[in-house]
Amino acid sequence: MSDILEIFMSASFWAAAIRIATPLIFGVIGALICERAGVLNLGIEGIFTAGAMAGWMAVWLGAGLWGGVLVAALTGGFFGLIHAVLTVPLGLSQHVSGIGVTLFATSLSYFIYRTALPDVASPPRIEAFQPLDIPVLSDLPFLGPALFQQTPLTFLALFLVAATAYVLYRTPLGLAIQAVGDNPAAVESQGLSVYGLRIGAIVAGSAIMALGGAFLTMSAFDAFFFGMVNGRGWICIALTVFASWRPGKALLGALLFGAFDAFQVRLQTEVGSFIPGQMFLMMPYILSIAALIVVARRTDYPRALLVPYFKGQR
Amino acid sequence: MIRFEPRGPVAVSRMIGVSVTAALAALILAAIPMLFAGLSVFDAYGLMIKGAWGSMFAFTEMLTRAAPLILTGLAAAVAFRAKLWNIGAEGQLYAGALAAVAVGTGLISGPSFVLVPAVILAGALAGGLVMLVPTLLKTRLGVDEVVTTLLLNFVILLFVQMMLEGPMQDPMGMGWPQSEPILDEAALPKLMDRMRIHWGLVIALAASLGVYFLLKRTVWGFEIRAVGENAAAARHAGIPVTATFVRVGLLSGALAGLAGVGEVAGLKGYLTADLSPGFGYSGIVVAMLAGLSPIGVVFAALFIASIFVGADSMSRATGVSNYLADLIVAISLLCVLVSGLFLRFRIRLATSSPAQETAK
């Protein structure tokens, strides 16, 4: 019992929780923007992979770290645009189109990586983002190492949460995005473009998702591996429902998730000899399913989610 | 101004036309990554065709690869018909394989005509039961099945790894994470001497006919189609929607489980955690290429299997990554989605806007 308390008392535990949460924050915010506009984006898993590969490769080719972040975002936006065209003006099944984008983005990323690096024994490494040294804050006892010694991308993720909340709730654009996910016909009658708003939201949301992938190869690790996304995208889709499509709750959900994951990794070193490691590795997925079950009864989906809109049709 | 006008019922010939167009479009678009990799497109396709159809061995290898794709394709087709979004065929396949190994490595003993059906039944049951969980979560609690089936894939694969490193590990396996070999009496027989092709293909073809008959000629099939068309209307018309979802879930999972049985009891002989190179996900492409038709699934699976086997062979000859196969398969899915529009809509270049049209 005292061991468990010790885990919570260590600054490294909280730092790890935030580190694990960071890609999920990007992913949930991206998914939330798409779904608030009425479109489920199951391309997320592939967009994570594409962002991870493209960002890493840009840095490896000499674009610089922030150049890599930009390339990752543009890559995400590109795959988002494919999903947007298929689901918005063409009105195709959002489920199948999303799976298609995931398969396409994943296989294209793997193919390009393998073609550029045909036979390397170990994946080439880049000089990844280092934790920021913020004056005063980083040096605080306990709080400094626990909260403020993170890489710039983590702070970018936190900024995006605040920016998304501001845009969504405080600007005409945000209100229009919410409306287009609830009642597109009403938006059309206001003289706004349903297609424009939805396509824009999907492209922006996908660009943000891709940053979650870029965090993996440019902050958490310094190389690209096959299968490194490992279901994180799907977990984000579950967390979006858990967060009731609210940026603040999304942040909370991702942090809770990160804390739980960091906790079980540490618990594993305590009791690992009694329980097979796979039991611990299963936990994130089971936890995501549990989160969906917990909120199932009181989910308040954007009312036009999954419903394609055709002009002039009621 | 482009307009989509809904069409009425669709002729089979038009459905086939759409699928063939999509497949051809995917092959044409795949020339771009081929050129990027420095391949000569015609030589590469020549090698792929030779690798999948060029000899008896190549042809049987292609058919061997098609068997699990037919079954996972059927799993997706049946579920999608009812708009039950089962994206978990990969996990259900592993559950089927695990159950087949559990039964087929000595749990029961007996002659082939007892053991083989027992293994098949166990695999189908395991796959069905795995899919029952997300189905019940959907019907009872309203939990979206897309995310739960996707997440369960990871859980099941980890469970399989846990079993293969634990209670089900082969004690003679030099510490490798693999199961004991399936007993000879429990293995699906080979179809030809000196080739790997096995009875899994026959099971797959029979399943395709069975699903066709079920959907076309039975009350349950009618209910499945009605629920897929419009669940609310079906409920209003007195169709047992919840029971239909449960039946579809069990059937879809069982079909994917059978794919696992074939791979482990027909092809490999023992279970490893890399049994499936994504058959569950490719099954979705197969089903969509087939227009969700159970007979079409067979032909779509032959196409996808040809790409995988052909690209493997081409990759060995040229050194270009065989991720190209996954890429072509993914492009096929996007192409069939777009060309499906021509199936459901008549596309017109309109001179007047729809708003004016409705005002008339």
Image (cartoon, coloured by chain):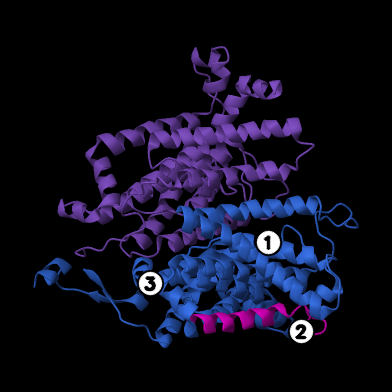
Chain colours: A purple, B blue
Q: Amino acid at mark 2?
A: Leu
B181 sits to left or right of B266? right
Tag 2, which secondary structure? loop
> Residue at 83% of width from left, 65% of height from top?
B107
Residue beneath disc 2: B191
Q: Amino acid at mark 3?
A: Gly
Q: How far apart are the alpha carbons under marks 1 and 3?
A: 36 Å
Q: How far apart are the alpha carbons under marks 3 and 2?
A: 46 Å
Q: Is residue B82 above or below residue A88?
A: below
> Residue at 81% of width from left, 57% of height from top?
B178
A283 sits to left or right of B87? right
Q: Is residue A67 above or below residue B207?
A: above
Q: Is residue B200 magenta?
A: yes
Comparing labels 1 and 3, the label whose residue is closer to the camera: 3
| Residue A73 visible, this orientation | no
Q: Is residue A27 magenta?
A: no
How many residues crowd around disc 2 within 10 Å: few (fewer than 14), some, or many (20 or more)?
A: some
| Residue B336, x across and y down, in percent | 45, 72
Chain holding disc 3:
B
Comparing labels 3 and 2, the label whose residue is closer to the camera: 3
| Residue B105, x across and y down, in percent | 83, 65
Q: Is residue A234 above or below residue B34?
A: above
In the rendered image, the residue lying farthest to the left is B360
Tag 1, which secondary structure? helix
The magenta span reads B188-215
Q: Earlier in the sequence, mark 1 or mark 2?
A: 1
Chain holding disc 2:
B
Residue beneath disc 1: B94
| Residue A214 visible, this orientation | yes
